[in-house]
Amino acid sequence: MNANSYIIGIDLGGTNMRVAAVSSAGEILCAERLKTGASEGYEAVIKRIASAVLSVSGQMPAKPSAVGLAVPGAIDFAKGVVTCSPNFPDWSDVPVARDVSNLLGLPVVIENDANAAAVGEGWSGSAKGVGSFVMITLGTGVGGGVVLDGRVWRGSSGMAGEIGHIPVRDGGRICGCGKLGCLEAYASANAVARTARERIGEEKARQLLGLANGVPEKIDSNLMAQNAGMGDPFCVEIFDQAGRDIGKVMATLALTLDISHFVIGGGMAEALPFLLGSMRRAALDHAYTLNEGKLEIVKATLGDDAGIIGAAWMGIASARPFQS
Ligand SMILES: [Zn+2]
């Protein structure tokens, strides 16, 4: 690919999609955001993706060389098929790559969105130059992407990196996946807010409740991070516990994969200053293979752009390691 060519990267969400022209250096040149319209069904979404690609590429001097599409859900990467997606109930074994490609006459590659975000961070973000790392996305849920020697590890059925569903409690809260005691049920943005609401009757929750104007439903992880920043011990304690749970899972990953570099992304990455201490302590306490100097926990730097940039990378060369 020459220096003037570009790729279209798409981050497809259940509510919105973002479509961008991405340079061969991993920079976003222009972008559009539009409603996904998932409830209108598969055909309508595919057509909307194709017309958004045409709209963005129409602002560029030439045609894109390829399209990379990040999709939430389980992907058969080799076949370009979405096996299933929680955000798109009617998407069951749908050949997304082929169908979008037929509409555009361009090569199309699809990738799981968490994997795409990890690739984006590895290509031009916080893990640039790091061959092996795990990205942990702390949002509504807890997502993960595993990169080994510059390549995404997809596993035998494309389900690798489901870090949010590693158990951290015996029994415990029921998770969205149907199992009990998953990391996601304790350390996602939703989960920490739930913990605060469950304990809202405690005396030490008064400051947080005041900040939420006395309405527990208004408590979210952003409000809690704001309160923790003002030194409120209640919020500090809840983030501390979530950090410890994440740190234990990091130890598991470090011991399994010999990983020492972790990237924290997602909306709750803003609370990383309140998670980091206990996260590091737990990772170091439980993984004898790690030490203070070796363990790196960094905040993702690409924000919402990571998925688009990673998807664009997949469009350039799906099989090429990005640090070669
Ligand atoms: Zn789960």
Image (spheres, rainbow, N blue to C red):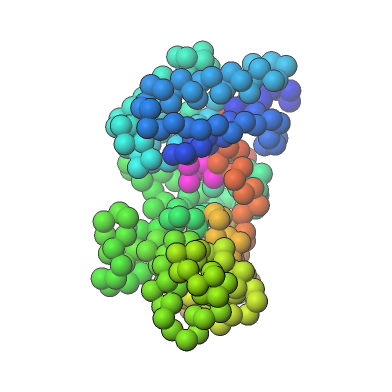
Q: 235 or 129: which is nearer to us?
A: 235
Q: Residue furthest bottom?
A: 203
Classify 301 as above or below 31: below
Query: Which quadrant of the structure image shows residue 226?
Result: bottom right
Q: Residue at x 66, y 17 (%)?
A: 58
Q: Position of residue 57 (x, y in %)?
A: 64, 20
Q: 103 or 97: which is nearer to us?
A: 103
Query: Which quadrant of the structure image shows residue 6?
Result: top right
Asked if residue 289 shows in the view, the reply is: no
Q: Position of residue 227 (x, y in %)?
A: 60, 73
Q: Residue at x 55, y 31 (%)?
A: 34
Where's the N terminus, which quadrant? top right
Q: Is residue 265 left or right of residue 28?
A: left
Residue 143 included in the magenta stretch of the image: no
Q: Position of residue 203 (x, y in %)?
A: 47, 86
Q: 113 or 304: which is nearer to us?
A: 304
Classify 28 as above or below 131: above
Asked if residue 179 shows in the view, the reply is: yes
> What secondary structure is the stretch in magenta mostly built from?
helix
Query: Which quadrant of the structure image shows residue 317?
Result: top right
Q: Is residue 113 left or right of residue 1?
A: left
Region rendered in magenta: 113-117
